[in-house]
Image: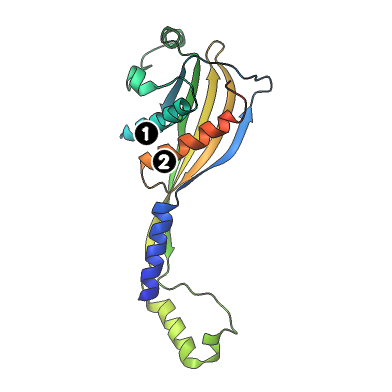
Amino acid sequence: MKTLLSIAILSLLLMTGCATTKITSTWKAQDVTPQHYNKIMVLGLIRTADRTLQENMENHMVGDLRSMGYNAVSSLQEYGPKAFDNMDEQAAMDKLKNSGVDAVITIVLLDKEKEKSYVPGHIYYYSPYSYYYRHFWGYHTAMYRRIYEPGYYVTNTRFFWESNVYEMNTQKLLYSIQTQSFNPSDSESLGHEYGQLIIKNIAGQGIFQ
């Protein structure tokens, strides 16, 4: 029983305390030179009924940009949730230009996957020469615990993200970065971790002055 409890606690810690976002690939335009941008907009394209995720993702990235000295705004705060609804390209570009936006960083949720896996009640490592195998009762006890102690299911969630940096005068793509986030505890911690990782990476690529 103690073993089962220890496994459950360890699994809970792994699920809630070790959420990680990692970079899977990047791309940079060949002729990019560092530029000064007067106003950088962070635009989340996240299909979800709960707008909290988009708010947290945008707000944390904006905060990270501002902490590095850049003038950045959230699309939700600037325009609201229906910023470019029913607009054609020219109208959207005019709207951005009139707001003084000359660079955009997108946050796109490409996919979200959930995977259920079974965790046995007793973790057993096979070795025919182990102590348990050399003694009948030790072998009986080890096998009994493996067979009869109940296990449980855990659900792991993966988010697949992409962020692009665009220069608005030409609408040119300057930089693209893809990431995976594994088992975030909530959208607040996900936004915090994602924003720091992406802005630190972009800053190291010589995109912005």
Residue 170 in picture, x, y percent from top left: 57, 11
- Residue drawn where x is 41% and y is 41% of the image: 190
Amino acid identity at mark 2: Leu
Nearest to N terminus: mark 2 or mark 1: 1
**Image location of residue 61, percent across then percent down:** 44, 30
Q: Dot 2, crowdedness within 10 Å: few (<14), some or many (≥20)?
A: many
How are the residues colored?
Answer: rainbow
**Farthest residue, direction right:** 30
Q: Residue at x 52, y 92 (%)?
A: 135
Q: Are marks 2 and 1 in contact (CB under 8 Å)?
A: yes
Query: Which residue matches tag 2?
Result: 190
What's the residue type where badge 1 is placed? Answer: Asn
Q: Is residue 116 visible?
A: no
Q: Which residue is mark 1?
A: 56
Disc 2 on helix, strand or loop?
helix
Tell me the distance, in whole angstroms, between the alpha carbons under discs 2 and 1: 8 Å
